[in-house]
Image: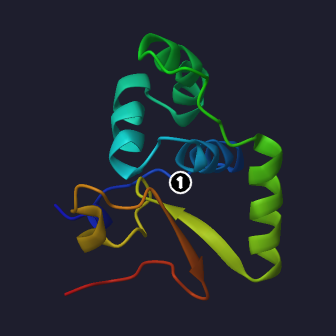
Amino acid sequence: MSREDTEAPTLNDEQRLDWLCLIRSEHVGPRTFRALLNRYGSARSALDALPELARRGGAPAPSRIYSRENAERELAAMATLGVGLLATAEADYPQRLAMIDDAPPLLAVRGIWRRWHYP
């Protein structure tokens, strides 16, 4: 069964903001992002856990967490350019890209991008 045959969730606006905040936070790359989502179940829960994770990991200072205000400004600027964010959890995310270990959690897309199909 392909991804197109299953009903993949679509992130709501709050979840998309949380995903953007998490991936833009200090020391969070694509692999860490995926591990945090798997462990905590949501980007919001992972964001809430970051300060404690840094403390337990012996970080001398808390990791910088990308602010919700910055994420909102970034999304607003993107919208003025006709750009949106597509998440790995969504059906329209390119299948082949999703197969790699460090696929970007979010893709900035512009134009018609619904239901890309690959052979």
Up the image or down, 13 lies above or below 117; here it is above
Q: Is residue 89 left or right of residue 95?
A: right
Up the image or down, 109 lies above or below 23; here it is below
State the residue in front, 67 or 4.
67
Residue 24 at x, y percent in the picture: 59, 50
Residue 83 at x, y percent in the picture: 68, 77
What SS does tag 1 mark? loop
Residue 48 at x, y percent in the picture: 60, 22
State the residue in front, 58 or 14.
58
Quadrant of the image occupied by residue 101: bottom left
Which quarter of the image is occupied by the C terminus?
Answer: bottom left
Up the image or down, 27 lies above or below 55; here it is below
Quadrant of the image occupied by residue 104: bottom left
Up the image or down, 32 lies above or below 91; here it is above
Residue 76 at x, y percent in the picture: 82, 65
In the picture of the structure, the residue carrying the numbered disc 1 is 10
Which quarter of the image is occupied by the N terminus?
Answer: bottom left
